[in-house]
Every structure is written in C-alpha cells, then in structure tokens.
Image (tube, rainbow, N blue to C red):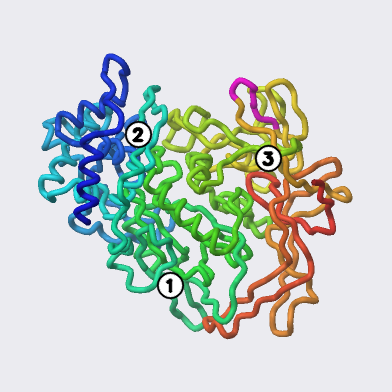
Amino acid sequence: MSSVLVVALVSSLLHPTHPPLHPTHDPGRQDDFVRAAARYEVPPSLLLAVSYLESRWDANAGLPSASGGYGPMHLLGPVPAGEQEDRRGDDARPLAPAPAGVAGATLAEAARLTGLPPERLREDPVANIRGGAAVLAAYRAAAGGWYEAAARYGGSRAFADEVFEVLRTGAERVTDDGHPVRLAPNPKLAPPPPELPMRTEAAAAPTECPSTLACEWMPAAYARFGKKNYGNHDRVRGRERRIDYIVIHDTEGSYRGIPSMVGDPKYVSWHYSIRSRDGHVAQHVATRDIAWHAGNWDVNSRSIGIEHEAYLAKGPTWFTEAMYRSSARLVRYLADRYDIPLDRAHILGHDNVPGTNAKTLAGMHEDPGPFWDWERYFALLRSPLKAASGGGSVLIKPDYPRHAQTFTGCAKKKPCPARGYSTVWLRTEPRGDAPLVDDIGKGGPTSTYSVYDHSARASAGQRFAVAETRGDWTAIWYLGRKAWFYNPAAKPTAVRTGGPLVVPRRDRVPVYGRAYPERSAFPSGVGYQRHIALPYVLRTGQAYSLGLTVPGSYFAAGSFNPARHVLVRGRTRYHQIQLGHRVVFVKAKDVRVVR
C-alpha cells in the first residue's frame, strides 16, 4: 500500500469530517461504535466501515450469518464439527474436512481480548462492537497499519479495498435497534494504488471479473466417466452463445465444500461462487460455456449461474453486505458485457426458473428464498426498483427491513424468527384470514407458509398485471386466477407501474417451461424436442407482464466433443411472462401485446 494512501487514510480516519455523536444526544448504536472506538483507539470511521460491510450495523437478533458470524461486527465462531454432507440434500457429496487455521475465528479472539464470554459477544450488540474494536486494534498492532488490520479482519485484501470504498462513499441507515447510524463520506480518500491488482494469487487462469473485484480461478471438472457420460458442464467452441439471464443461487452449504462439489465431474456446476464473510469470488466455468445449474436446459443454455454461500432457512441466516456488494459488481460487469437488462425478468432467482414439464415442476429449487433482499441488491446494481410510467401493473416492493411475515420451515415446530422478508403472501380473497392461493403444479394439496414453498408468494421486483383493487388490497393475475395481497396506502407493499402486458387471443392458451423451436427447424441427426405444455393456461380477460421476447432455440450438446454440438434456431417466437412466482413462456402467436 502506498505511503500517500496510508497518510490520507490515517488523516481522514483520525480527523473525521463530522463530530462524534454524544450519547446523551443520540442514544443507540452510533454511540456504541464511538465508545468502542475510543476504548481501543480505533478510528471510529474505520470501525463503522468494517461493520457496515459485515452486517450493515444490524445485530440480526443474535442469529449467525451464513459463514457463522454474529452481531454488528460479524464475530466468527469456530467451524461446526461433524458437517458431512452437502446441504443441497445430496448425500453422495461429502464435504472435505475443514482446513486447519480457518481464517476469521474472531469470536474467541474477542473473548480473550475483552474478557467477555462468547455468548455475550454473540447476543449483546454493545459487547459485540467492543469485541470487534478490540480485534481490529490487535490486528493493527501486529500488522502495523489499519489497512492490513481490515484485510486480516475480513479475510482478504479485497475486503480492505471495499472498506476504503465505504469510507469514500459513506453510508447511513436506521438499524434494527430503531436508531439512525451514519458514516460521513470522505470522497478525497485516495483509491488503492493501481499497481496492486485485485486478482488473487490463486488465479492461475484468466478470470472474467471486473478489475475492482477479487476473483480466483477454481475450475469445474470437465471429464469423461463411464462409456458415454461426462461432466459437469458443456464446452462451447466457435460461436458465442446467447445469454439472456443471470441466475442467483444460494449454496445450501458452506464455502469450504465448493471445491469438492464443483471439481467432481459426476456433480453439477455453476459459473461463480461468492463467499459470505468477505465477498470473495471464485469462477468455475467460462461464461461462454454452459454450466449445469438451473435445472432447466433451456435456461442453462442462455444463462450465467452465481452461487452465494448461504442457507435458505438455517437460522435463518443473513447475507452480508460484503457478499451483496461483490455480487452486484460482478452482475453489473456481466450485464454490461452481454447486454442483459437489470430487471427481474433477466436477473432471476433460482426459485424463478420454471420446470420443463409437469413432472419437474414440484422438484424445482427454492433458493435464494424470501430472505434475499432484492430491493437492496438492485440498488447496488444501480438499477433501483421503482415505478415506471403507466399504471396497468404493480411492482412488488415491500419495505424489507420492517416487512414482518409469518414463515415456517426454519426449525422444527417453531415459526421462523421475525425479521425482514422480500415477499408478499397471496390469498384467494381480500382479507387476512383468507386461504393462500394454490399452485396446481406444486404437487401438494394446498399451499403452506414454509420458506420452501413459494406457491402463494410474489417477490420484490416482480411485475404483475393488476386485476382488481378493494380498499387496502390489490389483486394480480397469478397462475391463472386473481390473487390478493395486502397493500395499504399508509404502508404499501407494491407500487403502481407501467410496462407491456400480454393478453390471450383465445381461451385456454398453453404455457411452456422452455422456448424450443418448431419441428421443421431441427436438422437431420438432432432429435426433435417436443413442446410440452405446463399444467397452467391463460384465460380470456387475464393479463400478464411481458419480460422479454426470444426466438425458439435448442442447444444440442449430447457429446463430450464441442465440435459435435449443434445450435438449432427456429422461427417460432416466445414471450416470457410472469405467470406466478416463476416465469414461463408463451408462443407469441397465441397472445396480444398491450403497451
């Protein structure tokens, strides 16, 4: 790190641009940071910036993050012992033993330095902030500088660089204790020196990441096994594949299990993984190649998949700001490179990907789930969720931090903890005690409140056609029927917006889980892929939001040799629509576009 940058940092940190808030003037977490910083002689701005990246200054009710971090300072506990299988539910994928000296066991270090018991450091935000300050001060004494201390605290130099970015831009929000916290911006703080690239030493091959993002190459396996089988992705040579989507996943397991999973040719693959504690990125598959990540070959062949270290319902865990920011930087870079619009029609959750037929619908994945903050994510993508001109649609937009909902499935016989959610419940009638709407494709008799069942949920950023309004309730067209959600004017959960809609030209228009070409487009030697309708239909009088329009295509990749792959292009055009929580495709000739 350059001497000029060190001088600038020390000057800006030790002489902040705003005076510390006195506890009698503003009780709350802001003063907790000021007091802890003074006690351990840590610059308050640095303490705030580190905490913002780890937790956005929230305590999260003492629940652990996906990487096992607690409280505003994300103090990391020991790696759990006895973890023997992938949390996707695949018993055939044992995880490798945890490596010795896993970075970031800061909870034990904080307990040693402060004399406070670990349980108090986990559960008491004031103690947690004090513990984080003590660890940072100790790291600085050992390393000789605050930049190095931040890097060690977060686990990587990329984390320290992101700390500097937060110091430059500043931040402010109301935290989960109900009080405002503010870090004043310092735009004059010098950026990291350009001669220090952010690529990690592990990047033995060129990675596809923005220059401002740490990224290593951790290749997925591409190998034969058995007589005809191979895995775990498809190579594409001599042509650029069309990329329409970026699919957001969570790993349902710890980051340490990723090398053994993605390195096995008998398993599946994805393009990138992002670590929770510091936002570190690993790339596994070149973006020109097809990873096996979405459970739908049509979507696989036209998408890039990004896994985030997290568990959909464990705890529930929470996503760190560092991970959100790294993911957003990566997605902005990929969207610009492949001309992908930054909206929920193109940036999909894995839970938005449709099944290819009626048999596969019930088994489609549910991640990243209702705890993923889509509104925060799109703000970081610099494409905030907001209304457009018009009014025939609504954009789902609950106030995530304060949008408490009833969920089950996080623990046996207990409701999930009260916290923010990015979804709204959909009911058969405009009243709070009405039953949830059902999804005939789910396979079960009725919808439930489980975090694993999104049959009756609409998610932030999704756009739906308005069917009716009654007082504080709004009805949307959803899975072929009216579905009602609570949307009071005093605390709205959606905003009116415009955008193109499709309406059926006749009654009972079929919908599909993939956009495949007509039979005549298939050349000799490539098996025709039948158009298999899903168990839903569009009825006259209904309307659905239009996301994108694509020509039918099918990438025939049944060989280990990429030279034998065939891209089948058809003339049949499909509209992607928001039918329910998942998107589907409808043939353009069967509907009319209303703008």
Q: Is residue 401 magenta?
A: no
Q: Could you give the CA–CA distance between mark 1 and mark 3, rounded to whole angstroms? A: 45 Å
351 sits left or right of 328 in the view: right
Q: Which residue is mark 1?
A: 265
Q: Residue at x 49, y 59 (%)?
A: 333
Q: Is residue 88 visible?
A: no
Residue 580: image location, x then y, percent = 67, 44
The CA distance from mark 2 to mark 1 is 49 Å
Q: Evaluate whether residue 193 shows in this view.
A: yes
Callout 1 amino acid: Pro
Give left or right: position of 441 versus 590: left
The quarter of the rendered structure image containing the N terminus is bottom left
Q: Residue 302, relative to residue 537: is it above or below?
A: below
Labels 2, 3: front one: 2
Q: Which mark is residue 382?
A: none
Q: Nearer the viewer, residue 368 or 439?
A: 368
* Region of the chain picked out in magenta, as a range: 484-491
Residue under label 3, please give it: 388
Which residue type does callout 3 highlight?
Answer: Ala
Disc 2 crowd rating (10 Å Cα; few below 14, some 14-19, many 20+) is some
Q: Position of residue 384 (x, y in %)?
A: 56, 42
| Residue at 45%, 44% in the rendered image | 312
Name the mark on residue 184: 2
